[in-house]
Structure formats: structure tokens, C-alpha cells
Image (cartoon, rainbow, N blue to C red):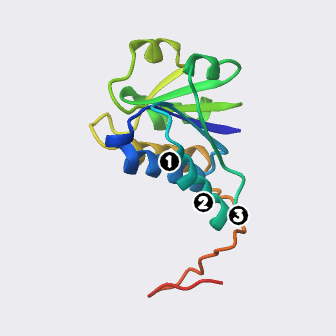
């Protein structure tokens, strides 16, 4: 099982980036996204609408206390300061909780995480780091979603089944 924790969601600033964290999480194999910061029913509805239309069993939930989520999980904190993901990815097993930051990440996250993992050790988007990490963690084995809307891959244009 793979779950994601998005830290520090701010309604006025993070709507788009938090939505992209959720979309990448779902598309690349996570089953659930927790988020902290400001509770945002619009954000939850937007993610749930994608699941309803495109399928899958992905859920989103507001978390008041992120520390509770760490219990019984292998906690992977994605940070540009972490160890190279390519050197550690084979060690990461079990019920996995991947933590991605928003605003400044509390030092306690660095201390409590089982792994502090970096994707390039350069500043870039948490969405990019999450996509690369999930792709490698799942060996590019993507889920079948069987939603109401199903995209038919094509060389040009847009097609649906």
C-alpha cells in the first residue's frame, strides 16, 4: 500500500500544486492522499470528481495530526536534502507513506522519517519529485482505472473509448 501526505496546504496559494500532487499520486499508484494545513472541501471535491470520472479507488482525507499517520508505516520524506532515491529505492517496502512538503517542513519530519530521499538534490517541484519517485517505486506498473472516461492513446488529437 502506498499513501501520500501533503504537508501545509494553503487554500489561497496551493490549490493548483496540491491538486497536481493528488493527480500524480493517483495516476502513479498511491491509494490515498492525506493533507494538512487548511481544510479545503473544494480541493477534496475536485479530487473526488476526477476519481468518479476516471476511475480507481483513490481517496483524499484531511489530517489534523500528521504524527498519527506515521504509525506502522515506512515513512519516506521527499526532500532535496535527502539521499539519492536510486540508491535506496530497493530497501523501501511495506505500507509506505510518502511525505511531500508545502511550506517550510518541520524538522521533526526529517527526524521521524525512515528515509529522507532526494530526487536530484536540486530545488524543483514536489510534484516532479513525487512522479519520478512513484514511477521507480512501482517499476512503472500502472494501475487500470476503468472509469467512465477512458482515454484511448493516439499519435495525434484526443480520443476516448
The percent position of residue 102, horizontal first and vertical second, equals 37, 33
* Quarter in which the N terminus is drawn: top right
Q: Nearer the viewer, residue 145 or 124?
A: 145
Q: Which mark is residue 43?
A: 1
Cα separation between marks 1 and 3: 24 Å
Q: Is residue 140 at all visible to an observer of this figure?
A: no
Q: Residues within 10 Å of mark 3 (few under 14, many from 20)?
A: few
Cα separation between marks 2 and 3: 17 Å
Q: Secondary structure at mark 3?
A: loop
Q: Are marks 2 and 3 in contact (CB under 8 Å)?
A: no
The percent position of residue 68, horizontal first and vertical second, equals 63, 18
Q: Is residue 68 above or below residue 94?
A: above
The percent position of residue 150, horizontal first and vertical second, equals 64, 75
Q: Which mark is residue 122?
A: none
The percent position of residue 28, horizontal first and vertical second, equals 58, 53
Q: Is residue 154 above or below residue 142?
A: below
Q: Are marks 1 and 2 in contact (CB under 8 Å)?
A: no
Q: Which mark is residue 49?
A: 2
Label 3: which residue?
A: 144
Residue 42 in the figure: left or right of residue 148 = left
Amino acid at each position: 500500500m502506498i499513501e501520500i501526505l501533503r504537508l501545509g496546504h494553503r487554500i489561497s496559494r496551493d490549490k493548483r500544486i496540491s491538486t497536481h500532487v493528488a493527480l500524480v499520486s493517483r495516476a502513479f499508484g498511491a491509494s490515498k492522499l492525506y493533507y494538512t494545513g487548511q481544510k479545503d472541501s473544494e480541493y477534496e471535491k475536485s479530487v473526488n470528481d476526477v476519481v468518479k470520472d476516471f476511475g480507481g479507488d483513490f481517496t483524499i482525507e484531511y489530517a489534523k495530526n500528521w504524527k498519527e499517520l506515521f504509525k506502522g508505516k515506512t515513512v519516506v520524506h521527499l526532500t532535496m536534502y535527502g539521499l539519492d532515491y536510486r540508491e535506496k529505492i530497493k530497501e523501501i517496502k511495506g505500507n509506505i507513506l510518502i511525505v511531500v512538503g508545502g511550506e517550510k517542513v518541520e524538522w521533526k519530519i526529517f527526524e521521524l522519517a525512515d528515509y529522507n530521499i532526494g530526487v536530484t538534490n536540486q530545488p524543483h517541484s514536489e510534484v516532479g519529485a513525487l512522479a519520478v519517485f512513484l514511477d521507480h517505486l512501482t517499476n512503472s506498473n500502472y494501475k487500470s482505472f476503468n472509469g467512465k472516461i477512458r482515454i484511448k492513446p493516439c499519435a495525434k488529437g484526443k480520443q476516448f473509448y
